[in-house]
């Protein structure tokens, strides 16, 4: 569900989207590294995964705002 955004808002959303995607990739790498160590702190691992889920939801929201609705 895209919202009518002016150019400045669109650029801000795209910048945030780019930053969030990079953070999501970084968290994915950190989680994989902790899993490979085996003796990872489970609480820290849970926090990283929770942050990753939040980022996924925010990325999805921003994508929806930037993508125009197409009526089939």
Image (cartoon, rainbow, N blue to C red):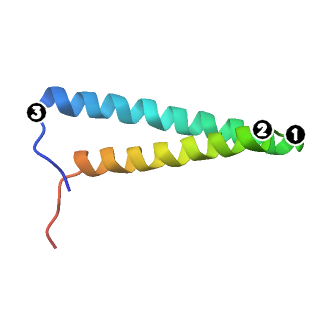
Q: Report the disc number at residue 24.
A: none
Question: Dot 3 corresponds to which residue?
Answer: 6
| Residue at horizontal 26 percent and vertical 28 percent from the top | 12
| Residue at horizontal 17 percent and vertical 63 percent from the top | 70
Q: The residue tagged with tag 1: helix, strand or loop?
A: helix
Q: State which tag comes first along the sequence, 3 or 1.
A: 3
Mark 1 crowd level (few <14, some 14–19, many ≥20, 10 Å Cα): few
Q: State which tag comes first along the sequence, 3 or 2.
A: 3
Q: Report the disc number at residue 33.
A: 2
Tell me how far mark 3 sits from mark 1, CA to CA: 47 Å
| Contact, mark 3 vs mark 2 (Cβ under 8 Å) | no
Question: Where's residue 49, x and y in %?
Answer: 62, 46
| Residue at horizontal 73 percent and vertical 42 percent from the top | 43
- Name the image quarter holding residue 18: top left
Question: Where's residue 24, x and y in %?
Answer: 54, 39
Mark 3 crowd level (few <14, some 14–19, many ≥20, 10 Å Cα): few
- Name the image quarter holding residue 34: top right
| Residue at horizontal 14 percent and vertical 30 percent from the top | 7
Q: The residue tagged with tag 2: helix, strand or loop?
A: helix
Tell me how far mark 3 sits from mark 2, CA to CA: 41 Å
| Contact, mark 2 vs mark 1 (Cβ under 8 Å) | yes
Q: The residue tagged with tag 3: helix, strand or loop?
A: loop
Question: Where's residue 69, x and y in %?
Answer: 17, 59
């Amino acid at each position: 569900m895209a919202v009518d955004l002016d150019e400045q808002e669109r650029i801000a959303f795209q910048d945030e989207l780019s930053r969030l995607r990079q953070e999501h990739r970084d968290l994915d790498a950190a989680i994989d590294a902790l899993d490979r160590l085996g003796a990872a702190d489970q609480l820290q691992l849970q926090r990283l995964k929770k942050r990753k889920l939040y980022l996924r939801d925010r990325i999805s929201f921003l994508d929806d705002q930037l993508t125009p609705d197409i009526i089939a």
